[in-house]
Image (cartoon, rainbow, N blue to C red):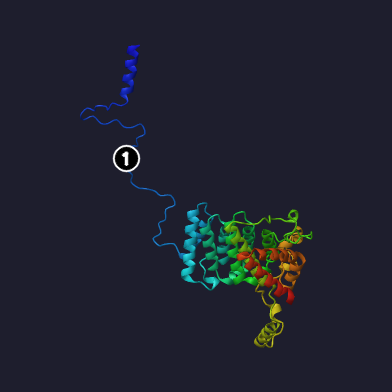
Amino acid sequence: MAGASAKRKKEKAKDFQKPKLKVGKAKPKASNATDTSFRAKSITLKQQSLSTSAPSASNQFAHQLSLLSSKTDSQRRDALSSLVNTLASSKVADPSELPQPAVTIITKARPLLIDASKSIRASTLELLKLVPTQEVVRNIETIQIYVHIGLTHMVSDIRMTTLDVLDWLLQVAGEATVSCAGGWTGTLKRLVGVLGWQSTGGPPNQNGNAPASQQGWSNTPRTKLEDTKLRARQISTLSLLLNAGLRSPNADELVLRERQRAVQLFPLQDTNAHMLPRTPNPFGYLSLFSDAEDLTDEEGHVVADWAGRMIKLRDAYIHGIEQGVSVAKKEGGEIGRAAMSVEKAVKIHLRRG
């Protein structure tokens, strides 16, 4: 037994003993050693470029656009920064001078409006603001799709950023925003829904709201500071939407414009009927290319004139908005001030309508 114990001790001690190397004898190579004794005559790189000139600005811009669909946050953020710097430095006013077509820029950038990263969403909005306004108007429906998604998103930060996007659209292209497909009914339904101000036909409860069983969103009191700010912003955006959608043209101003136009085109008459339309999808209200099931979806309807939007508001939303405003004013603070702006917009336009 003693001999076996001593043998085991020697075997254990052998692992910690430094081997004595003889002079002139090479150190043994490791089992995973790589042989580097060979010499190569040339090195071949895959997809190497032999061009001595740098890529054009258009190609660089297109490459950065392609990176917007990257799975990596840092790549999307860097690509957006490069695109914003390019457009900001050039200050393009004519769409033909853009490095890439505006529809391509908007199509690539719009999904990032609901990105998980706050900085990416902010940079995307900054990029869209640098696109000429007339191109934003032409592609307003494609942007509205992601605005509608963001308004009812589960993440509160994304809902807040979406309100910034909608406020910007109402400021620079208010008429196009509310007159495109779903621009009035779809946006109004979502804003009223997240506020819990739906009109339901049932008797209101003690707080002046519709019965909870008939509401699509919870109407429980919000006590957190961020919830209060978000709710105040939603009510303020609703006020902007009502003002943009229910603003009627000045009759005297329209008559003056028609007379000036007639003088410019004399002796031609009814010229506008033979010219190309300036608005996107000018015949969308006819639903010529819509599927049968789409015709029953009120969210996708085109309400091109303020009178039609007034009718939609009165028929489906006004009672819920009035009840919600009366409750919100009692809360005071930011929410109360925002509710008063909605009440003012409703009174002005309903009295006129």
**Horizontally, is 183 left or right of 101 in the view?**
right
Disc 1, SS: loop
In x, y percent, where is residue 170?
A: 62, 69
Residue 224: image quadrant is bottom right
Q: Residue furthest top?
A: 1
The amino acid sitting under disc 1 is: Phe
Residue 4: image quadrant is top left
Above or below, 13 against 48 in this view is above
**Horizontally, is 50 left or right of 293 in the view?**
left
Above or below, 258 against 154 in this view is below
Above or below, 292 against 135 in this view is above
Number of residues whose C-alpha sits closer than 10 Å to that of mark 1, classed few (under 14), some (14–19) or many (20 or more): few
In x, y percent, where is residue 336?
A: 64, 66
Residue 6: image quadrant is top left
The foreground one among 263 and 129 is: 129
**Horizontally, is 322 left or right of 107 in the view?**
right
In x, y percent, where is residue 267?
A: 69, 88
The foreground one among 268 and 321 is: 321
Residue 94 visible in the current orientation: yes
Quadrant where the N terminus lies? Answer: top left
Q: Determine which residue is flagged by label 1.
A: 38
For the point 22% across and 27% down, which residue is it? 22
Total labels: the figure holds: 1
Q: Residue furthest left?
A: 23
In x, y percent, where is residue 60?
A: 47, 62
